């Protein structure tokens, strides 16, 4: 039985005092859930968030990392740096990083390998644009992105990788993929993993859906056979709303 992982992606939002306040509000609301609760916060909030999430079931993640350990990479943060302060999760290859900051399937693969080597828990994002979906290319795009992201990993590493299927056209637009479309696309991803790594691995990989998830649609999405929780943007900025998403099954 795969665990549901509900992760917030705050993107470039919230100052440390707001992060601490959010965690104080969220803690009692999600303390009894059986789902994994994660918030991926800006770098400047990481340390404060980790301190305030101590002793709770809220896990803290970063939104990006570099694949090199150190060096002349102005403005970058390494996986080692994240690990050194106790960060547990890291988002890799979000479509906004692919679109605005030159992230490629190759850098995603390098970052994923590095995150796994450091025992950070990676959430790797894949997803097609509206034009690609309308042209009937969604399957090709997401399966290729998945294959290239996972290239060179062993079975054990693939099992530890969380994949987030986020159709680009559903991000921040209020347009959610239908539960059937989201589930079908996630099945394509799972089938691709099965082709390369076998059924046992494919059946154990956690694959989330992301794109305009909110309390009003979380239950119908997360109850689908292949959707193992969500990566939540806008709706994760409000503690009450995010708690409702986490508690979709109570
Ligand atoms: P929204 O939930 O705001 O659509 O964002 C989704 C997302 O990009 C999460 O990573």
Image (tube, rainbow, N blue to C red):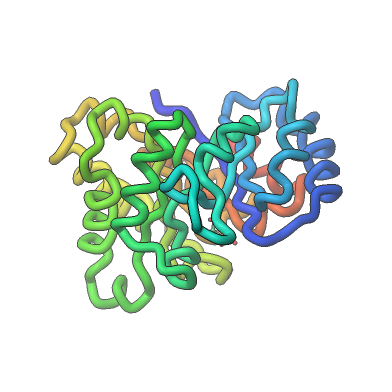
Instruction: Point out the image quarter for the C terminus.
Output: top right
Name the residue nearer the viewer: 79 or 70: 70
Q: Quadrant of residue 202?
A: top left
Residue in view at x 32 percent, y 28 percent: 204
Q: Is residue 134 left or right of residue 83?
A: left
Outermost residue toward the front in this view: 72
Outermost residue toward the left in this view: 195
Residue 133 placed where, x, y %?
31, 71
Residue 23 placed where, x, y %?
78, 38
Q: Is residue 121 above or below residue 245?
A: above
Residue 79 placed where, x, y %?
50, 41
Residue in view at x 38 percent, y 32 percent: 117
Q: Quadrant of residue 47?
A: top right
Q: Quadrant of residue 137?
A: bottom left
Residue 69 placed where, x, y %?
46, 42
Q: Is residue 129 left or right of residue 203?
A: right
Quarter of the displayed picture in which ligand 1 can be seen: bottom right
Is residue 250 visible in this depiction of the protein? Answer: no
Residue in view at x 57 percent, y 67 percent: 172
Name the residue nearer the viewer: 198 or 43: 43
Is residue 140 visible in this depiction of the protein? Answer: yes
Q: Is residue 140 left or right of residue 176?
A: left
């Amino acid at each position: 039985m795969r665990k549901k992982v509900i992760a917030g992606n705050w993107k470039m939002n919230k100052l440390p005092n707001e992060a601490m306040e959010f965690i104080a509000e969220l803690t009692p609301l999600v303390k009894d859930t059986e789902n994994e609760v994660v918030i991926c916060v800006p770098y400047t909030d990481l340390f404060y968030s980790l301190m305030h999430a101590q002793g709770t079931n809220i896990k803290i993640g970063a939104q990006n990392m570099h694949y090199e350990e150190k060096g002349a990479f102005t403005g970058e943060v390494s996986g080692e740096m994240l690990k050194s302060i106790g960060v547990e999760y890291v988002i890799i290859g979000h479509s906004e990083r692919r679109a605005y900051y030159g992230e490629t399937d190759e850098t995603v693969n390098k970052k994923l390998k590095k995150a796994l080597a450091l025992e950070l828990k990676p959430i790797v994002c894949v997803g097609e644009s509206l034009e690609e979906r309308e042209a009937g290319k969604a399957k090709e795009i997401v399966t290729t992105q998945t294959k290239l992201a996972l290239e060179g990993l062993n079975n054990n590493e693939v099992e530890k990788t969380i994949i987030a299927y986020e159709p680009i056209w559903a991000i921040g637009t209020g347009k959610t993929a239908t539960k059937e479309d989201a589930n079908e696309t996630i099945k394509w991803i799972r089938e691709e993993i099965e082709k390369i790594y076998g059924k046992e691995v494919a059946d154990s990989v956690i694959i989330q859906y992301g794109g305009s998830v909110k309390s009003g649609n979380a239950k119908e999405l997360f109850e689908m056979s292949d959707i193992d929780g969500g990566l939540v943007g806008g709706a994760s900025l409000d503690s009450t709303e995010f708690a409702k998403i986490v508690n979709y099954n109570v």
